[in-house]
Image (spheres, rainbow, N blue to C red):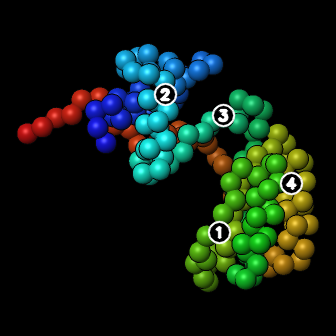
Amino acid sequence: MDFLDREILLKTQGGLPLVSKPFDEVARTIGCSPEMVRERFQKMLEMGVVRRIAAIPNHYQLGYRLNGMSVWDLPDEMVDELGVRVGSLDFVTHCYRRPRFLPDWPYNLFAMVHARSREELDGQLLKIQEILEGNCRAWDVLFSKRILKKTGLRMAEKRCFD
């Protein structure tokens, strides 16, 4: 990573500018072309320096007051296939396979759901159960109690050398 990459990351680590052409604005503030910013981001994505560029909405401000991580105990040979189907539901924001920790934690599929009411969330869970078609041995929902600040790694503005 060179000086320009570092400047791009410093200017965007708190989020992209909320304008119609955010890369153009970043380019203007650091004194390079918008094409250069896009090229550098693409290279950093390919190298794994940046994992993704995505919007992170505040679901509470959008009216979604209930957040539940649903956890499901599925046969290992079916979890990938069923997980793809569950993950394609429009109300599931995250869906992934996780290892079990037997005997206390038998769940191997996690699916995050957001709802405006308990009734809406219960309906979502029923839709997931329908997809699982009797392949689920156990399930539960872990509800969020508070909002955690969603941020990634932050770089210091200045580097210090001994």
Q: CA distance from mark 1 to mark 4?
A: 19 Å
Q: Earlier in the sequence, mark 4 or mark 3?
A: 3
Residue 98 sits above or below residue 66 on the image: below
Dot 1 falls on a residue whose secondary structure is strand
The residue labelled by disc 4 is: 124
Dot 2 falls on a residue whose secondary structure is helix
Q: Which mark is residue 97?
A: 1
Q: Earlier in the sequence, mark 1 or mark 4?
A: 1
Residue extending furthest toward the left: 162
Q: Residue at x 64, y 46 (%)?
A: 145
Q: CA distance from mark 4 to mark 3?
A: 20 Å
Q: What amino acid type is highlighted by mark number 4?
A: Gln
| Closer-to-camera residue (85/21) | 21
The residue labelled by disc 3 is: 58
Q: Residue at x 43, y 37 (%)?
A: 40
Residue 147 sits above or below residue 82 on the image: above
Dot 4 falls on a residue whose secondary structure is helix
Q: Is residue 97 left or right of residue 84?
A: left
